[in-house]
Amino acid sequence: MGSEVAAISSWQPSASVAALQSRAHQLAWVRGFFAQRGVMEVETPVLGRYGVTDINIDSVPASPVPVAAGFSNGWLQTSPEYHMKRLLAAGAGPIYQVARVFRDGEFGRRHNPEFSLLEWYRPGFTDSDLMAEVSELVCGWLGCDAPATMRYRDVFLRFAGIDPFLASDSELSALCEQWMEPSRLQSLSRDDCLDLLMSCQVEPALAEIGPVFVTGYPESQAALARVSEQDGFRQAHRFELYVQGVELCNGYWELTDKEEQQWRFAADNQARRSAGKPEMPVDEAFLAALDAGVPDCSGVALGLDRLLMLKLGLDDLAGVIAFPADRA
Amino acid sequence: MASYSTNEFRGGLKVLLDGDPCIILENEFVKPGKGQAFNRVKLRNLMTNRQWERTFKSGESLEAADVIDLEMEYLYTDGEFWHFMKTDGSFEQYPADAKAVSDALKWLKEQDVYTVTLYNGAPLSVTPPNFVELEVVDTDPGMKGDTAQGGTKPATLSTGAVVNVPLFITIGEVLKVDTRSGEYVNRVKGG
């Protein structure tokens, strides 16, 4: 209670002015990076008609007064993805955005419910093409070594000692017992168990090695990435970059198939129902854009606050965000 | 009883875990961007004083523990219980057993005020103030002129506590002692 009151009564920013100067430099550097490459900066709504169906991402509801043909039950966007894909379908070509996004309930040293997301799309790029560009951007700014690439399966085998594709549910659950009591583990799905091991065991181990791209996620964690069979397993063309154990970005060779997308939305809402979470309306405008034709492309979203945190050698986002949630 | 969700967890909050009252020390939120969120929580079990690390799925909740800290005056012991009285003028008395007073026992002086932690209305633990002032009842004779030399000797205080004191300290003097480290701080004027 005391700290809550202290935080609210504090008018000062949690980040130093020097950190805020670095933040301004970073933003200018990022814009220069894309200007050089002929990628167009765009802006899309922060307040939209639809949220997302992802079971683990909660949108913040926002209810404006309905204007002509508008909506009254909207959502602060968790990522500019659907709007940007509508721009891709409209022929925008390569585009990027520095977006303010919102994720309800996420707060900690590496989370703030409102944060800056750098998202960009590259028509004609595969996931490996885009990983090369991410590497140039991140390492160009941080001055770090070019990231290694490891498969999701291999990071689990090496750092958690378990095969995420072949282990049985009970083997996974047993391994999770070092973090959670068996009675609480019963409420975890297979993917929840993998996420627990990722957060508690794999990420801390990744902090001990240099920058690394993790690729080849299980099909159940494909999100909006296309899936193909590789090395005998159905794997998502999804990649994440970890620098010093910090998850910095999430990218896909994008799914552009409307039917498949529709099916995944429905599956998300099914999972939401089973978990007792509210179902989310499906973004019909995005589906219509997929129907009209989103070009073959890869896209990625990168956390700018975390990038700056790494640049400045800090371990808490409060050092790089002027006013985090506890003093916003 | 109220309960707290993981997003309300913060240092100092008292909750029930496995039937025992615990105080939350740290709460770390972890979550893969697209994945399930968890809270990695450090707690201290108030019954055993042992530190626990537990992970919760975000959104889970724990029942609040009925634990409060109250200032109380120490009255006396009957050998089995140590009796404390509220300082709010209510004269309400609480008997604390040997387990509850164990950490404070050697600092207990009648009429001094202590922090008594109540769990479900009964004393769970007694915490002395950070500094207490107690009289020396036994120590080797003082050596005049030795004030600057350093060097220490044991001294027994009125509560039975034994602390290391400078060589010049004599019986009957009142000393200020840090109860956290058990170390001598200084002589109290007029002692």
Image (cartoon, coloured by chain):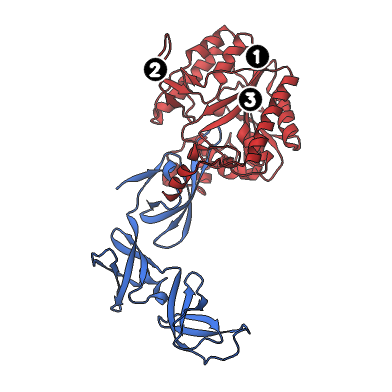
Chain colours: A red, B blue
Give the residue type at disc 2. Val
How many C-alpha atoms fall within 10 Å of the one at disc 2: few (<14), some, or many (≥20)? few
Q: Earlier in the sequence, mark 1 or mark 2?
A: 2
Q: Nearer the viewer, mark 3 or mark 2?
A: 2
Residue toward you, A54 or A285? A285
Q: Callout 1: residue from which chain?
A: A
Q: Is residue A164 above or below residue A79?
A: below
Could you give the CA–CA distance between mark 3 and mark 2, rounded to whole angstroms?
Answer: 33 Å
Frontmost residue, A197 versus B8 = B8
Q: Are marks 1 and 3 on the same chain?
A: yes
Q: Quadrant of residue B79?
A: bottom left
- Residue A159: mark: none
CA gap between label 1 and label 3 equals 14 Å
A246 to the left or right of B7? right
The mark nearer the N terminus, 3 or 2, is 2
Outermost front residue = B190
Considering only vertical position in the picture, is A65 above or below B29? above
Q: Secondary structure at mark 1?
A: loop
| Most foreground residue, A34 or A157 | A34
Q: Which residue is mark 2?
A: A65
Q: Which residue is mark 3?
A: A300
Identified at 52% across, 49% down, the residue is A178
- Under mark 1, the amino acid is Asp
Q: Which mark is residue A296?
A: 1
| Mark 3 crowdedness (10 Å alpha carbons): few <14, some 14-19, many ≥20 | many
Q: Nearer the viewer, residue A299 or B152?
A: B152
Q: Residues within 10 Å of mark 1 (few under 14, many from 20)?
A: some
